[in-house]
Structure formats: C-alpha cells, structure tokens
Image: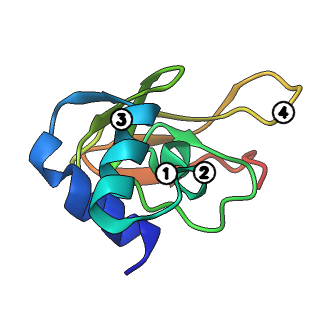
C-alpha cells in the first residue's frame, strides 16, 4: 500500500476536519507503521504544490503552516493553486474550479 493510499484510508474518518501535520503522521503511523518522516501532507494538497512533485494527487486543503483539512479524493475544490519554492516568493500557478484544475502557462515545474 502506498503512502498516498494509507493517507486516504487513515484520514477518511476525518473528512472535513482540520488536522495538524503531526496528527496526520501519527494516525498513519499507528495504523500502518509508516515512518512519520516519510509522510508529507503538503505533497497532497489542492491549493499548494511542492516544486518537484511529479503529479498532483490532492486530498488535503492547506490551511496554515502545519494545518490541513482532509477533503478526500475527487473533491470539487475551487480556489487558487500556489507554489512556494525555497527562498522565493509564493506564486499562484493555477486555479481549481469545481474540481477541475487549470495551470497557468507561466507555471514553473
């Protein structure tokens, strides 16, 4: 089972709830024994993407530093998609509308 699949299964009971990164890691670790250092919730956000992430498989909404809301698969998310490369300003690189993502042509990968 991939970490992504573990996150979906472990967080499903918390749909719509605000969770800290620490809570998410603990929940997955307790259920699957996955090392907490291997679990990176920010890799799976509708509204934030880490530079270098190969594909976007969102299940969380980034709320604030270390805080995430579990929304689940195929959520009809609407809002901006941001990227913040290290030591650079945050920039909007796309936008979600009812679960459909449009990346701007100026988005850097």
Q: Is residue 74 visible?
A: no
Sequence-earlier tag: 2 or 1: 2
Q: What whole-number distance in Å separates the C-alpha atoms at marks 2 and 4?
A: 19 Å
Q: Nearer the viewer, mark 3 or mark 1?
A: 3
Sequence-earlier tag: 2 or 3: 3
In the figure, is residue 46 to the left or right of 27? right
| 64 versus 10 height, above or below | above
Sequence-earlier tag: 2 or 4: 2
Mark 3 vs 1: CB contact within 8 A: no
Instruction: Check residue 86 in the rendering and tell me which mark sits there, or answer none.
Output: 4
Mark 2 vs 1: CB contact within 8 A: no
- Which residue: 75% across, 58% down? 52
Q: What whole-number distance in Å separates the C-alpha atoms at marks 2 and 3?
A: 13 Å
In the figure, is residue 38 to the left or right of 105? left
Between 69 and 32, the residue placed more toward the observer is 32
- Secondary element at image label 1: strand
Q: What whole-number distance in Å separates the C-alpha atoms at marks 1 and 4?
A: 23 Å
Q: What whole-number distance in Å separates the C-alpha atoms at marks 3 and 4?
A: 25 Å
Sequence-earlier tag: 1 or 4: 4
Q: Is residue 43 visible?
A: yes
Q: Which residue is mark 1?
A: 102
Q: Which residue is mark 3?
A: 23
Sequence-earlier tag: 3 or 1: 3
Q: Residues within 10 Å of mark 4 (few under 14, many from 20)?
A: few
Residue found at the very far bottom of the displayed protein: 1
Q: Position of residue 29 (x, y in %)?
A: 39, 55
In the figure, is residue 25 to the left or right of 56? left
Q: Which residue is mark 2?
A: 37
- Secondary element at image label 2: helix
Q: What whole-number distance in Å separates the C-alpha atoms at marks 2 and 1?
A: 31 Å
Q: Residues within 10 Å of mark 2 (few under 14, many from 20)?
A: few
| 53 versus 36 height, above or below | below
């Amino acid at each position: 089972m991939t970490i992504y699949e573990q996150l979906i299964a472990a967080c499903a009971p918390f749909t719509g709830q605000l969770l800290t990164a620490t809570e998410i890691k603990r929940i997955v670790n307790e259920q699957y024994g996955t090392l907490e250092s291997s679990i990176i919730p920010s890799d799976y956000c509708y509204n934030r993407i880490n530079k270098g992430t190969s594909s976007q498989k969102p299940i969380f909404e980034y709320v604030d530093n270390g805080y995430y809301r579990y929304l689940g698969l195929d959520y009809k998310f609407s809002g901006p998609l941001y990227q913040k490369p290290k030591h650079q300003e945050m920039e909007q690189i796309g936008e979600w509308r009812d679960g459909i993502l449009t990346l701007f042509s100026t988005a850097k990968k």
